[in-house]
Amino acid sequence: MLARLRDNWVYGGFLAGIMLLVLTPVLASDWSWALTLIWLQLPAYMIHQFEEHDADRFRAFVNTVIGGGKEVLTRMDVFIINILGVWGVDAIAFLLAAWVHLGLGLIAVYLSLVNGIIHCLQAIALRRYNPGLVTSILVFIPLGALTLWVLAGNADVTATDHVIGLGLAILIHAAIVVRVVRHKRQLDRADGTARA
């Protein structure tokens, strides 16, 4: 059962993202515009994940481009990164924004923005499409910019909130890169040992 969840999470996430968007007018009827925009980060990310991970495209892309054909990013890596590192982080950021301090919602906003910018920079560097690029351009960057603009006009949101949000987003993405690089080194060492 875990293997089916690991391999098919993106399809449930895509449908859940659409459902969350459909329910947003009712759920957010008493929320501020700023809190609603923070809420929208999660369904937007779920829709982005469909472009990125449908048919295992992103993992195949990373394993080909970075891994040189070696499995440097496993299906379980992708599952954990996206369920805990995206859905979990976005859910916690929204709850913190709603119950503790609005500015903590910037964690979710910067998570989307950093991811979108990385997709764009990667496309420029490689001069090719990468899975997730279209929704990064059409969804993440405009939604993130709008949310930052709205939150910038809120006196409760501080520079410290931006530092926390951006810092955590960069840290999460850096952890993914470290995981892939370490796994590649392990595979390269094992490959070198096998040849010797």
Image (tube, rainbow, N blue to C red):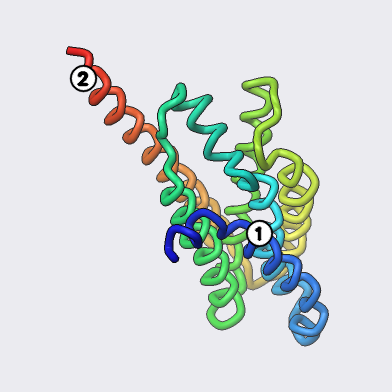
**Residue ID for mark 1:** 46
Compared with 46, 103 (above or below) is below
Graded by Cα atoms within 10 Å as few (under 14), some (14 to 19) or many (20 or more), the crowding at tag 2 reads: few
Q: Is residue 101 left or right of residue 40?
A: left
- Asked where in the image residue 61 lies, by quadrant, the reply is top right
Q: Is residue 44 left or right of residue 6?
A: right
Q: Are marks 2 and 1 in contact (CB under 8 Å)?
A: no
- Residue 129 drawn at (x, y percent): 70, 29
Q: Is residue 163 visible from the viewing direction of this image?
A: no
Q: Quadrant of the C terminus?
A: top left
Type of the residue with mark 1: Met
Q: Is residue 155 left or right of residue 171?
A: right
Task: Using the image as rendered, state which of residue 87 and residue 4 is in the foreground.
Answer: 4
Residue drawn at (27%, 21%) of the image: 191
Check residue 194 in the rendering and tell me which mark sits there, or answer none: 2
Q: Is residue 26 visible from the viewing direction of this image?
A: yes
- Residue 46 drawn at (x, y percent): 66, 59
Task: Using the image as rendered, state which of residue 186 and residue 168 is in the foreground.
Answer: 186
Type of the residue with mark 2: Ala
Residue drawn at (47%, 53%) of the image: 81
Q: How many marks?
A: 2
Compared with 101, 164 (above or below) is above
Q: CA distance from mark 2 to mark 1?
A: 41 Å
